[in-house]
Image: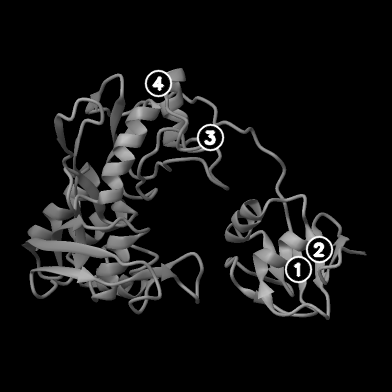
Amino acid sequence: MTGDGSGVLAVRGDGERQAVVGPETARTRLDRALAAAFPDVSRARLQDLVREGRVRRDGATVRDPAAKVGPGARLALTVPEAVAPEPLPEARRLVIPYEDDDLVVVDKPAGLVVHPAPGHEAGTLVNALIAHCGASLSGIGGVRRPGIVHRLDKDTSGLIVVAKNDAAHQGLTAQFADHGRSGPLERAYQALAWGVPEPRVGTIDASLARSQRNREKIAVVRAGEGRRAVTHYAVEAAYPEACLLRCRLETGRTHQIRVHLSHRGHPLLGDAVYGSAFRTKAARLAEPAQAALAALGRQALHAALLGFAHPRTGDPLRFKSPLPASMARLVRALAAE
């Protein structure tokens, strides 16, 4: 055990790195305490490791880098073995509505992770794009996220645009940062939700932040405590137990549509994370709809529309994606009830 004068004592444990916060140290942020104990690891890296669940405080996993630690707290850090710094190319059939020298638009299937992350080091859209685009794929988004401008959840299907060079990446990133408030960006999703929201056309304006109860979830918080999030929705079709919605994002927060609709009491069909309390409602559906929902096996959310200005020419580009077969089957079954 050694001390560095900061009040944090670093020790070596069996298979992990450990530290004990010294008795003279005031309460501080977890990432600061870790940085003092392990100066060979950057603070940014330590923050990522915390979010990945690789840090324990007094035996309990902590996922918030800003969590407070006090004197005597025992910290345990696991640094995973180094992996290949760049994702490897993997041949995979992709549905590509449009491609040129600057960008590629992909109609992503459900179940495909967009970029490598812990637990998903391979088999991602990025791996497939590297094989498809080769050396032209932009790296400005980071080694692990080359060309990625925006993302879709693993189990959300639909349209995503990827930049193939740095200039295109910068131009597209600026449009997505504006979220279409003053620029040409358009994004619309189709979603199947439980019940029918009232009014049938409206806006959900509710700030979002990482849940304090479950750090793997996003939650609605009071204004000023998180990041503002705005979702515009309209009911396209109403069924006895559910409805088909069209949602337009004014902001682009993690899980935004899923959390906003759940907050309003209309979670997405098939959403095991934010709609688990509605799982028993499936028994109210007619047998064909129950079977279609079980076959869907994911949240009923599809990125159906994507429009933007070409980052080099300025020409308007607009793409539509039909509902995937499994989701369309569920819509037909609900409509037949």
Residue 75: assigned label: 1
Look at mark 4 in the image and give the residue it sits on.
Answer: 133
Of the 4 image quadrants, the one containing the C terminus is bottom left
Query: Which residue is depicted at the point 27% across and 68% down?
Result: 260
Callout 2 secondary element: strand
Amino acid of disc 3: Val
Look at mark 2 in the image and give the residue it sits on.
Answer: 18
Spatial separation of the CA atoms under disc 4 and disc 2: 43 Å
In the rendered structure, which disc, 1 or 2, sits on the residue that comes first in sequence?
2
State the image coordinates of residue 246 (x, y, percent, origin top left).
14, 56
| Residue most extreme to the right | 1
Tell us which disc is closer to us: 4 or 3: 3
Spatial separation of the CA atoms under disc 4 and disc 1: 43 Å
State the image coordinates of residue 152 (x, y, percent, origin top left).
35, 47
Amino acid of disc 4: Cys
In the rendered structure, which disc, 3 or 1, sits on the residue that comes first in sequence?
1
Q: Nearer the viewer, residue 3 or 212?
A: 3
Q: Are marks 4 and 2 in contact (CB under 8 Å)?
A: no
Q: Residues within 10 Å of mark 1 (few under 14, many from 20)?
A: many
Callout 4 secondary element: helix
